[in-house]
Amino acid sequence: MSEQGQQVGPVDHPTANGHVLLNGKFQCNCGAVMANKQHNISSHISKKHREGSAFQRAEEINRRSCGICGFNAIKFHMLVTHVRNEHGFRGETRVLQDQYTTSQVDEAILIPANQCIG
């Protein structure tokens, strides 16, 4: 149900599990929010909920963690955004990229403390 416990409108997809929010967007039962359009919902279901999708396989092989707080990133750019916003990293992205490409799934990427502000 919506933020106020009521269905706001019809879901524009025949098999989707979720509801329409007060702002008109669709919220999947997994928590993802998107436009209430059949093609958007179909894309989400295909990527996130279809067993063994290419998207899921990529998430599995690309996952690394922040060496400071353990945040799990499923893509390199997510790790960079995280360490810049949360830890004030101001160093060269290449330092992180070199570790990311040579590390294994779930390994921590060490963030140089001397390149962080705060």
Image (cartoon, rainbow, N blue to C red):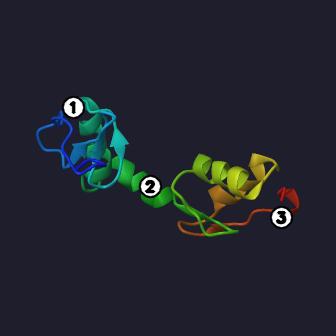
Q: Give the mark, 3 or 2, whose residue is nearer the N terminus.
A: 2
Q: Residue furthest right?
A: 114
Q: How many residues crowd mark 1 within 10 Å: few (<14), some (14–19), many (20+)?
A: some
Q: Give the mark, 2 or 1, whose residue is nearer the N terminus.
A: 1
Out of 8 and 73, give the one closest to the viewer.
8
Residue drawn at point x = 69 percent, y = 56 percent = 86
* Place of residue 27 in the rendered image (x, y in percent of width and height, measured from the top left): 30, 45
Q: Tell me the mark number nearer the camera, choosing from 2 and 1.
A: 1
Residue carrying label 2: 59
Residue drawn at point x = 22 percent, y = 45 percent = 19
Real-space Cα separation, disc 2 to disc 1, in angstroms? 24 Å
Out of 105 and 26, give the one closest to the viewer.
26
Numbered-mark total = 3
Residue carrying label 1: 38
Residue type for callout 3:
Ala
* Place of residue 91 in the rendered image (x, y in percent of width and height, measured from the top left): 82, 50
Residue carrying label 3: 113
Real-space Cα separation, disc 3 to disc 2, in angstroms? 27 Å
Pointer 3 with pointer 2, Cβ within 8 A = no
Residue drawn at point x = 11 percent, y = 39 percent = 14
* Place of residue 98 in the rendered image (x, y in percent of width and height, measured from the top left): 72, 55
Residue type for callout 1:
Gln
Q: Describe the element under mark 3 as helix, strand or loop.
A: helix
Residue 97 in sight from this viewpoint: no
